[in-house]
């Protein structure tokens, strides 16, 4: 099984700041990686797929990058609605695995 | 508008069964692979099972193999998850999710989730 190691587990930042979340796969996943945002009490929402492609309707302040085993999600100019939890996901093969999540909080 | 609406959750005793349903609308259901993803209280996301667009192929995480069965009724645009021999560790919110089209396996739309509590 492909393990997804996500860091940090939590992150505190201010409005307008830029933050980066990392995801490390236990083997090469050939950019077959997605990022999701989940707000408290809500279902996850797809942000980015294929490591760097923005899903429909996702603001351009979100961006993804990486290759091989190392990937990152960058959020520029944090807005109030961005404070949530974020998960990476291996979309290459079953079992489909998620990172353990990053909780982004307001400083 | 794509909508996925789960139902069938609740409190169940260990060892008993429960069946979840997910009613889909707003898209051509029989064109998409579908999945169940769960989230234990205060924990992260875990993929549970996937079924192909025509129901011919199913895939499960190891911990539910032999206990859970994913199925679909394309005529009714409905996805199901039959959960047998339930354990306390199956307690979670269960989300119905649509897979993206193509050979990659992302989830582009999710239901609101249904809570399953396994406890005596």
Image (cartoon, coloured by chain):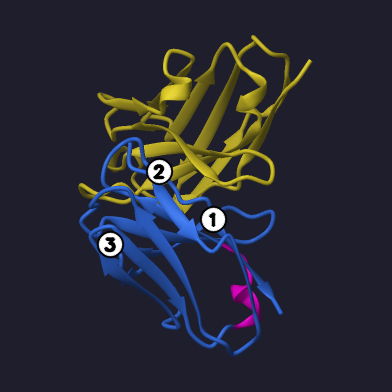
> Chain A's shade in the image?
blue
The answer to whether residue A56 is seen in the rendering is no
| Residue position marked by numbered label 3 in the rendering | A50
A92 vs A81: above or below: above
Nearest to the observer: residue A92 or residue B70: A92
A42 vs B80: above or below: below
Question: Looking at the image, do the residues carrying marks 2 and 3 touch, with CB atoms under 8 Å apart?
Answer: no
Q: Residue B65: within the magenta?
A: no
Label 3 SS? loop
The residue under the point 47% across, 21% down is B64
Residue A90, disc? none
**Chain under disc 1:** A
The residue under the point 61% across, 13% down is B17
N-terminal-most mark, 1 or 3 = 3
Span highlighted in magenta in the image: A79-85
Label 1 SS? loop
Cα distance, mark 1 to mark 3? 18 Å
| Residue position marked by numbered label 1 in the rendering | A101
Same subunit, labels 1 and 3: the answer reads yes
Q: Where is residue B74 in the image (x, y as percent from the top left)?
A: 36, 31
Q: The yellow chain is which one?
A: B
């Amino acid at each position: 099984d492909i393990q997804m190691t996500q860091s940090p587990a939590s992150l505190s930042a201010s409005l307008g700041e830029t933050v980066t979340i990392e995801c490390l796969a236990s083997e090469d996943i050939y950019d077959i990686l997605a990022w999701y945002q989940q707000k408290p009490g809500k279902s996850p929402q797809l942000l980015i797929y294929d490591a760097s492609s923005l899903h429909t309707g996702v603001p351009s302040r979100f961006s993804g990058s990486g290759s091989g085993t190392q990937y990152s999600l960058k959020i520029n100019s944090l807005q109030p609605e961005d404070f949530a939890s974020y998960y990476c996901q291996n979309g290459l093969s079953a079992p489909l695995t998620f990172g353990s999540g990053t909780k982004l909080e307001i400083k | 508008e794509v909508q996925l609406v789960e139902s069938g959750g609740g409190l169940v005793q260990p060892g008993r069964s429960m069946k979840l349903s997910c009613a889909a609308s707003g898209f051509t259901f029989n064109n998409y692979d579908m999945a169940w993803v769960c989230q234990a209280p205060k924990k992260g996301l875990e993929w549970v099972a996937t079924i192909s667009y025509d129901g011919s192929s199913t895939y499960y995480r190891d911990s539910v193999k032999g206990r859970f069965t994913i199925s679909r009724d394309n005529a009714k645009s409905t996805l199901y998850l039959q959960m047998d021999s339930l354990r306390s560790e199956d307690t979670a919110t269960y989300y119905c999710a649509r897979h993206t089209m193509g050979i990659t396996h992302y989830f582009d739309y999710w239901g609101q989730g249904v809570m399953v509590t396994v406890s005596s």
